[in-house]
Image: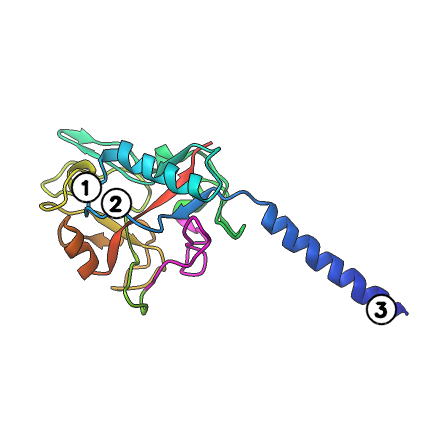
């Protein structure tokens, strides 16, 4: 009888834990699809609208969604990606905690192939999958801030180019090229859809609930 009670208690605790995880609202996802036009996302406004539309399709449209993207400007630094996404915490569609706050997000996030899910809770193709889609557009340095002015393009002309230029990308699976950065692994070959796909991307980006 005592063993039965212990077993029942353990089952109830397990169920409570599962319900707790399920109760966490989704506040982070990787876009399941890009806009299909390379690095031209329609600027930050277009990228934010894409995040919002995908969130609404997943039943999470009651939040304000923002794309994790930085910008550039001549003679100074542009908009920081980290400044656009609120303060956290952020959970994926499965209820897994990605980060409690901005500091944790940029130092030790729970960002891996198993947790970097899309808005529907599906795993995003990573290194070793066909096709590989682990290159995620960010235009950001590793600390989430905008690049210092230089001669390079890090944001596909502030997310309006689908040909010339380049974008800084991260690896959501934390693998590839000896760089484990989720948000600033390397520059893309160009801003065309074809070149993004050829080097392990698909024009996907991160979306965070900012409120």
Q: Earlier in the sequence, mark 1 or mark 3?
A: 3
Classed neighbour count for the residue bearing mark 1: other residues with Cα under 10 Å, few (<14), some (14–19), many (≥20):
many
Q: Which residues are magenta?
A: 107-126
Residue 189 % position (x, y): 14, 54
Between residues 56 and 5, which one lies in front from this camera angle?
Answer: 56
Element at label 3: helix
* Residue 160 showing in the rendered view: yes
CB contact under 8 Å: marks 2 and 1: yes
Q: Is residue 103 left or right of residue 132?
A: right
Extreme residue in the front direction: 57
- Give the SS element for disc 1: loop
Q: Of the numbered discs in the image, which one, if any, rests on residue 35?
A: 2
In this image, 55 relative to 74: left or right?
A: right
Alpha-carbon span between mark 1 and mark 3: 60 Å
Residue at figure coordinates x 64%, y 49% from the top left: 20
- Name which of mark 2 and mark 3 comes first in the sequence: 3
- Residue 23 picture location, percent across and down: 60, 45
Between the residue at mark 2 and the residue at mark 3, the CA separation in whole angstroms equals 55 Å
Residue 122 is one of the magenta-drawn residues: yes
Q: Residue at x 31, y 66 (%)?
A: 127
Residue picked out by circle 3: 4
The chief SS type of the magenta part is loop
Question: Quarter of the image holding residue 149?
Answer: top left
Where residue 72 sits, quadrant-wise, is top left
Whether residue 102 can be seen here: no
Q: Nearer the viewer, mark 2 or mark 1?
A: 2
From the image, state whether disc 2 or disc 3 is nearer to you: 2
Residue in the image at 47% along x and 42% along y? 27
**SS category of the residue bearing label 2:** loop
């Amino acid at each position: 009888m005592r063993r039965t009670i212990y077993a029942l208690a353990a089952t109830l605790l397990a169920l409570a834990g599962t319900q707790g995880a399920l109760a966490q609202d989704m506040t982070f996802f990787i876009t399941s699809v890009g806009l299909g036009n390379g690095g031209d996302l329609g600027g930050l406004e277009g990228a934010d609208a894409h995040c919002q539309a995908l969130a609404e399709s997943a039943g999470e449209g009651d939040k304000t969604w923002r794309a994790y993207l930085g910008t550039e400007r001549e003679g100074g630094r542009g908009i920081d990606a980290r400044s656009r996404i609120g303060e956290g915490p952020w959970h994926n569609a499965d209820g897994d905690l990605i980060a409690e706050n901005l500091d944790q997000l940029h130092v030790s996030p729970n960002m891996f192939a198993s947790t970097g899910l899309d808005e529907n809770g599906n795993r995003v193709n990573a290194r070793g999958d066909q096709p590989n889609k682990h290159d995620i557009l960010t235009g950001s340095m590793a600390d989430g801030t905008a690049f210092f002015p230089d001669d390079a393009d890090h944001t596909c002309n502030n997310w309006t180019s689908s040909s010339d230029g380049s974008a800084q990308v991260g690896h959501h699976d934390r693998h590839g090229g000896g760089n484990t950065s989720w948000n600033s692994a390397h520059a893309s070959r160009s801003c065309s859809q074809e070149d993004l796909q050829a080097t392990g991307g698909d024009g996907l980006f991160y979306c965070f609930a900012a409120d």
